[in-house]
Amino acid sequence: MNAFAQRIKTLRLTKGLTQTELGEKLGMAYMAVFNWESGRLPRPNKLPKIARILGVEPEELAKLWMEVSLEKERKEK
Protein backbone atom coordinates (compact mmCIF):
# COMPACT_ATOMS: atom_id res chain seq x y z
CA MET A 1 0.00 0.00 0.00
CA ASN A 2 1.44 3.36 -0.98
CA ALA A 3 1.36 6.52 1.15
CA PHE A 4 -1.63 7.99 -0.69
CA ALA A 5 -3.64 4.78 -0.30
CA GLN A 6 -2.81 4.56 3.39
CA ARG A 7 -3.77 8.20 4.02
CA ILE A 8 -7.11 7.85 2.22
CA LYS A 9 -7.96 4.75 4.21
CA THR A 10 -6.91 6.32 7.52
CA LEU A 11 -8.93 9.48 6.85
CA ARG A 12 -11.97 7.49 5.76
CA LEU A 13 -11.89 5.31 8.86
CA THR A 14 -11.34 8.34 11.10
CA LYS A 15 -14.50 9.87 9.63
CA GLY A 16 -16.32 6.58 10.30
CA LEU A 17 -17.13 6.06 6.63
CA THR A 18 -17.30 2.84 4.69
CA GLN A 19 -15.92 2.70 1.18
CA THR A 20 -19.49 2.71 -0.07
CA GLU A 21 -20.41 5.80 1.97
CA LEU A 22 -17.34 7.71 0.80
CA GLY A 23 -18.06 6.71 -2.78
CA GLU A 24 -21.64 7.96 -2.45
CA LYS A 25 -20.49 11.30 -1.04
CA LEU A 26 -18.14 11.62 -4.02
CA GLY A 27 -20.83 10.56 -6.51
CA MET A 28 -18.78 7.51 -7.43
CA ALA A 29 -18.96 3.76 -7.00
CA TYR A 30 -17.33 2.22 -3.94
CA MET A 31 -14.92 0.46 -6.30
CA ALA A 32 -13.20 3.80 -6.94
CA VAL A 33 -12.44 4.12 -3.23
CA PHE A 34 -11.39 0.47 -3.10
CA ASN A 35 -9.02 1.03 -6.01
CA TRP A 36 -7.44 4.10 -4.37
CA GLU A 37 -6.93 2.18 -1.13
CA SER A 38 -5.38 -0.63 -3.15
CA GLY A 39 -2.76 1.65 -4.68
CA ARG A 40 -4.33 3.24 -7.74
CA LEU A 41 -4.43 7.00 -7.92
CA PRO A 42 -7.55 9.05 -8.58
CA ARG A 43 -7.60 11.69 -11.28
CA PRO A 44 -6.00 14.87 -9.96
CA ASN A 45 -9.18 16.87 -10.52
CA LYS A 46 -10.92 14.69 -7.89
CA LEU A 47 -8.48 15.62 -5.12
CA PRO A 48 -10.21 18.82 -3.91
CA LYS A 49 -13.56 17.06 -3.45
CA ILE A 50 -11.95 14.06 -1.76
CA ALA A 51 -10.04 16.38 0.57
CA ARG A 52 -13.14 18.41 1.43
CA ILE A 53 -15.16 15.33 2.33
CA LEU A 54 -12.30 13.85 4.37
CA GLY A 55 -11.61 17.15 6.13
CA VAL A 56 -8.06 17.86 4.96
CA GLU A 57 -6.41 20.48 2.80
CA PRO A 58 -6.29 19.58 -0.90
CA GLU A 59 -2.55 20.33 -0.88
CA GLU A 60 -1.95 17.45 1.53
CA LEU A 61 -3.51 14.94 -0.84
CA ALA A 62 -1.94 16.60 -3.88
CA LYS A 63 1.53 16.28 -2.34
CA LEU A 64 1.04 12.58 -1.59
CA TRP A 65 -0.51 12.03 -5.03
CA MET A 66 2.51 13.64 -6.69
CA GLU A 67 5.03 11.66 -4.62
CA VAL A 68 3.36 8.35 -5.44
CA SER A 69 2.94 9.29 -9.10
CA LEU A 70 6.63 10.17 -9.42
CA GLU A 71 7.64 6.98 -7.63
CA LYS A 72 5.54 4.89 -10.03
CA GLU A 73 7.04 6.73 -12.98
CA ARG A 74 10.59 6.03 -11.76
CA LYS A 75 9.81 2.33 -11.35
CA GLU A 76 8.51 2.11 -14.91
CA LYS A 77 11.80 3.34 -16.38
Image (spheres, grey):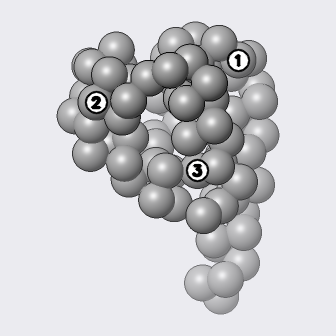
> Residue 53, how many percent across, how many down?
52, 13
Label 3 CA crowd tier, 10 Å (few <14, some 14–19, many 20+): many
For the question of whether residue 16 can be seen, the reply is yes
Labels 2 and 3: the sequence-earlier one: 3
Label 1 CA crowd tier, 10 Å (few <14, some 14–19, many 20+): few
Q: Is residue 17 above or below residue 7?
A: above
> Residue 74, how many percent across, how many down?
71, 78
Type of the residue with mark 2: Thr
Instruction: Look at the numbered discs 2 and 3 and tell me whether their residues touch, using CB distance below 8 Å.
Output: no
Instruction: Look at the numbered discs 3 and 1 and tell me whether their residues touch, using CB distance below 8 Å.
Output: no
Labels 3 and 1: the sequence-earlier one: 3
- Which residue does the image show at 64% across and 49% down from the upper left? 6
Q: Which residue is mark 3?
A: 5
Residue 56, by quadrant, is top right
Task: From the viewer's perspective, tell me whether residue 72 is left or right of residue 26.
Answer: right
Type of the residue with mark 3: Ala
Dot 1: what SS? loop
For the question of whether residue 23 can be seen, the reply is no
Label 2 CA crowd tier, 10 Å (few <14, some 14–19, many 20+): some
Q: CA distance from mark 3 to mark 1?
A: 15 Å
Q: CA distance from mark 2 to mark 1?
A: 20 Å
Q: Which mark is residue 12?
A: none
Q: Is residue 10 above or below residue 31?
A: above
Q: CA distance from mark 2 to mark 3?
A: 16 Å
Q: Which mark is residue 20?
A: 2
Task: From the viewer's perspective, tell me whether residue 31 is left or right of residue 16.
Answer: left
The N terminus lies in quadrant: bottom right
> Residue 22, how many percent across, how many down?
38, 24
Q: Which mark is residue 56?
A: 1
